[in-house]
Image (cartoon, grey):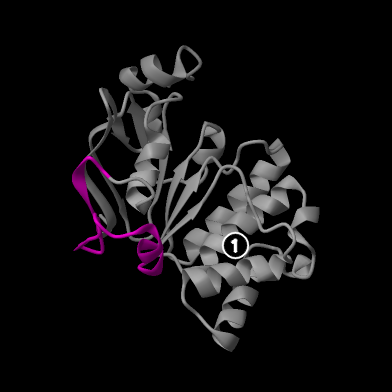
């Protein structure tokens, strides 16, 4: 079993009488890829918000490499190795692709000068954007905007990369390209946590699948086992799951 890099212990988030997260235990190991699935409103994005510090946990702790970062601000968590890409890319439209990624390298990772520039070139090459480096971000199509969203996150130098439904809106062929890119990221040793409703896409990448419902984890294990868990079928998959 790989060493845990990012760990959430008994995480809860409460808004008034609404408990969005309910004592969730979550971890991802070094170089591991974990998929997170569940119905809308299950608490998946809130979990990522708490892990990144965008939202403060009502209860529980978050640890990165064994260090308690529960009270740490999002930008400091980023500097310590937590990157995130969002479902809806929001690049700086008036900037070039290179300039967008430079923001991640400089503001996110604290790099300067040639070091930041070299990080950007490496990331753009990895993400298949090097030929578009001088294009304005506003001119990009959806797939390339999603690649840019990933590139900006990678430029921060993450040890753990959190992805929130980045496959949404892509065609089947574009989703296949996205899978290829994320598999390449895994070869770099980056741990990945990926929320996604496109389960056939997700299972091509992840080692482990976590299913949430009503703010709780109801299954956690190998993808095949989780997708055949009666609780997961009832809560999320319905009768569409393929029998073994």
Instruction: Indicate the position of residue 229 as horizontal and vertical percent values.
Output: 33, 23
Report the residue at 46% width, 45% height from top: 194
Taking depth in this image into account, of 58 and 21 the one nearest to the observer is: 58
Q: To which quarter of the image does residue 42 belong?
A: top left
Taking depth in this image into account, of 94 and 193 the one nearest to the observer is: 94
In the image as oriented, which residue stretches furthest toward the front?
Answer: 16
Magenta span includes 67:
yes
Instruction: Indicate the position of residue 101 as horizontal and vertical percent values.
Output: 62, 67
In the depicted structure, whether residue 211 falls above or below residue 182: above
Report the residue at 33% width, 60% height from top: 30
Report the residue at 46% width, 72% height from top: 109
Quarter holding the N terminus is: bottom left
Q: In the displayed structure, does residue 150 sit left or right of residue 187?
A: right
Magenta-colored span? 57-80
Q: To which quarter of the image does residue 34 belong?
A: top left
In the depicted structure, whether residue 130 falls above or below residue 15: below
Report the residue at 35% width, 45% height from top: 55
Taking depth in this image into account, of 75 and 221 the one nearest to the observer is: 75
Instruction: Indicate the position of residue 8 as horizontal and vertical percent values.
Output: 25, 47
Q: To which quarter of the image does residue 20 belong?
A: top left
Quarter holding the C terminus is: top left
Instruction: Indicate the position of residue 65 as horizontal and vertical percent values.
Output: 25, 64
Q: In the displayed structure, does residue 195 sit left or right of residue 151?
A: left
Magenta span includes 121:
no
Secondary element type, mark 1? helix
Q: In the displayed structure, does residue 70 sit left or right of residue 37?
A: left
In the depicted structure, whether residue 121 falls above or below residue 213: below
* Mark 1 burial class by Cα count in 10 Å: few <14, some 14-19, many 20+: many
- In the picture of the structure, the residue carrying the numbered disc 1 is 151
In the image as oriented, which residue stretches furthest toward the top?
Answer: 239
């Amino acid at each position: 079993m790989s060493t845990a890099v990012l760990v959430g212990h008994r995480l809860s988030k409460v808004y008034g009488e609404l408990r969005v997260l309910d004592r969730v235990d979550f971890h991802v190991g070094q170089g591991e890829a974990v998929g997170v699935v569940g119905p809308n409103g299950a608490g998946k994005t809130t979990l990522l918000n708490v892990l990144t510090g965008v939202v403060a946990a009502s209860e529980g702790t978050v640890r990165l490499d064994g260090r308690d970062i529960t009270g740490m601000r999002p930008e400091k968590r980023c500097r310590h190795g937590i990157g995130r890409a969002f479902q809806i890319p929001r690049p700086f439209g008036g900037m070039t692709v290179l300039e967008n990624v430079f923001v991640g390298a400089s503001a996110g990772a604290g790099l300067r000068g040639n070091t930041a520039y070299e990080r950007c070139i490496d990331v753009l090459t990895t993400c298949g954007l090097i030929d578009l480096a001088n294009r304005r971000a506003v001119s990009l199509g959806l797939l390339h905007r999603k690649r840019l969203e990933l590139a900006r996150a990678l430029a921060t130098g993450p040890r753990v990369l959190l992805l929130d439904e980045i496959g949404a809106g892509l065609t089947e062929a574009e989703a296949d390209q996205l899978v290829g890119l994320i598999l390449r990221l895994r070869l770099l040793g980056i741990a990945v946590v990926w929320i996604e409703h496109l389960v056939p896409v997700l299972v091509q990448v992840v080692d482990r699948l976590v299913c949430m419902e009503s703010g709780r984890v109801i299954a956690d294990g190998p993808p095949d086992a989780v997708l055949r868990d009666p609780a997961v079928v009832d809560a999320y998959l319905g009768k569409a799951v393929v029998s073994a």
